Image (tube, rainbow, N blue to C red):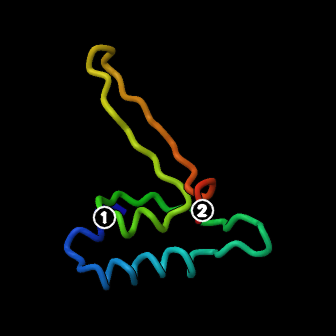
Amino acid sequence: MDEVDCFLDPENVALVSQFLTEKLNPPEEGNVGQTQVLLVSHKEDLASQMSSLVGVCSLKQLGTSKAYALNLQEYAI
């Protein structure tokens, strides 16, 4: 989903986040859900609710890109 939240106010961003975390094959007793969603967002409220973040940056001098992944579950409060 590419920036589906760009025109949403914070209340509706929270609803999208709730849907994604609760309705898409929720984990049961430590098992990972079966559905994966790739979501492009610039909203901190939505990104902070996800289990991981992936960033991609351009390496122009090499003519390629590099991806960085961060497992947010390791930093759960």
Seen in the picture, residue 9 relative to 60 is either above or below; the reply is below
Q: Identify the image quadrant of the N terminus.
A: bottom left
In what element is the residue under mark 1? loop
Q: Identify the image quadrant of the C terminus.
A: bottom right
Indicate the amino acid at tag 1: Lys
Judge by depth and name the residue closer to the eye, 77 or 59.
77
Disc 2 marks which residue? 76
Rendered residue at 38%/80% (across/down): 14
Identity of the residue furthest to the right in this view: 29
Looking at the picture, how far across and down is residue 68, in whole percent?
A: 47, 38
Quadrant of the image occupied by residue 38: bottom left
Q: Which mark is residue 69?
A: none
Rendered residue at 56%/81% (across/down): 23
Looking at the picture, how far across and down is residue 18, in whole percent?
A: 48, 81
Rendered residue at 33%/15% (across/down): 62
Indicate the amino acid at tag 2: Ala
Seen in the picture, residue 69 relative to 59 is either above or below; the reply is below
Q: Residues within 10 Å of mark 1 (few under 14, many from 20)?
A: some
Seen in the picture, residue 56 relative to 6 is either above or below; the reply is above
For residue 16, side relative to residue 77 (left or right): left
Identity of the residue furthest to the top in this view: 61
**First in sequence: mark 1 vs mark 2:** 1
Looking at the picture, how far across and down is residue 24, in whole percent?
A: 57, 75
Judge by depth and name the residue closer to the eye, 46 or 36.
46
Disc 1 marks which residue? 43
Measured in 3D between alpha carbons, the distance from the residue under mark 1 to the one under mark 2, in whole angstroms, is: 19 Å
Judge by depth and name the residue closer to the eye, 10 or 76.
76
Looking at the rendered image, the disc whose residue lies closer to the viewer, 1 or 2, is 2
